[in-house]
Amino acid sequence: ATPTALMAGTGKAAENGVLFRDGEAIQTMKDIDTVVLDKTGTITEGDHSVTDVVAGEAGVQSDGGVVESGDVLDEREVVRLAASAERGSEHPIGQAIIEYAGEESIELAELEEFDSVPGKGVEATINGSRVYVGNVTFFEEVGIEIPPFYGSRLDELEGEGKTTILVGVEDEVVGIVSTADTIKDDSYIPIETLHDRGIETWMITGDNERTARAIAEEVDIDPDRVMAGVLPQDKIEKVRDLQEEGKNVAMVGDGINDAPALKQANVGVAIGTGTDIAIQASDVSLVRGSLEGLVDAFTLSERIFSKIK
Ligand code: ADP
Ligand code: MG
């Protein structure tokens, strides 16, 4: 590209909230054939809220005090335990559960001990009992068996695209809290446009497979191109795998977790106000937080680099 064409092009893009790190980023963009989209915060708003609470047996009241193994808890108690344990967490899922407890005027308990396990959940000691809040992988690791009653409720909720969080006390599951995160209105068309241009799209997420597939289907991403249950530190591996298959990969993400994968990608794209870390790791920033900006970036790169020969 002539320097003037590049300058004019990047200036115009910047007005639309598409910021390129440099001219090279624009050039690399035109060879991209595969786009990996982070689910939470990229395709969805990243703003969880609680949708369902499942307890062992509705209507059974506990005294709100010490929870003994074998107790059957009601929904409020399940929320109280989950929200209390999440007090130490900054994860959007934890925030959503705490907010819900507030809306329901459920008072939280004191935390005696707290630990968070990235991509899995949190554990805490509350009134002397060990409380676990997290996904199936986490419960498997801790060694808490999931009874069929909860297993089928997990299936149901995840089939609806909801994120499911198990709540356990000592060695037993006592309930499920599910959250949902709305798909951005402006995710649908850009994904279609990428497909129309012959670009393959993938979704990557720490969320479980079923939930991820339900969301993928909703935005027309091939459910076989969903990489689910991916731990933050493993996202980079997934990008590398695609590159080893010969693909030119753009990765779009918003979080701290995404930075290494953004760096690894041929083009790293930070979306939204995002985190500084994601922006620093990226070649392109989509300031408006919409995938429409990604389509604009492709269009610009194509336009500039087809002119120059
Ligand atoms: P994402 O790719 O959606 O950003 P994360 O890696 O942050 O996912 O988390 C992946 C999964 O780990 C979540 O869907 C959830 O099941 C579980 N998880 C992570 N943090 C928490 C938490 N604080 N409380 C409960 N579950 C959690
Ligand atoms: Mg995340």
Image (cartoon, rainbow, N blue to C red):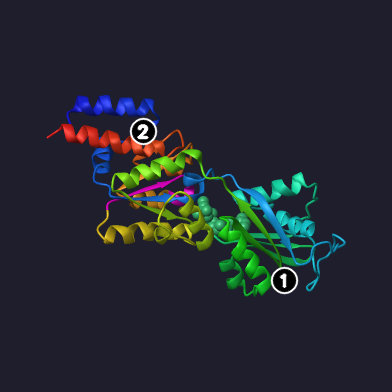
Quarter of the image for residue 246 reads: bottom left
Q: From the image, which quarter does the N terminus lie in?
A: top left
Asked whether 296 or 239 is in front, the reply is 296
Write down the residue under mark 1: 170
Residue beneath the point at 30% across and 39% down: 298
Residue 12, placed above or below residue 169: above
From mark 2 to mark 1, how far is it between C-alphas?
A: 50 Å
Of helix, strand and loop, which one carries label 2?
Answer: strand
Indicate yes or no whether the magenta region holds residue 110: no
What's under tag 1, amino acid-wise?
Glu
User: Would you say the residues marked 2 and 1 are in contact, meaning their CB atoms lie under 8 Å apart?
Assistant: no
Residue beneath the point at 26% across and 36% down: 301
Write down the residue under mark 2: 19
Q: Residue 92 location in percent, x, y? A: 60, 48
Q: Residue 296 location in percent, x, y? A: 34, 34
Pick out the residue farthest to the right.
63
Q: Residue 224 location in percent, x, y? A: 40, 61
Q: Residue 102 location in percent, x, y? A: 75, 45
Residue 12, placed above or below residue 100: above
Q: From the image, which quarter does the C terminus lie in?
A: top left
Which numbered marker is on residue 54? none
Which circle's residue, 2 or 1, is located before the other in the chain? 2
Asked whether 203 or 90 is in front, the reply is 203
What's under tag 2, amino acid-wise?
Leu
Residue beneath the point at 80% across and 46% down: 105
Magenta extent: 248-258
Quarter of the image for residue 3 reads: top left
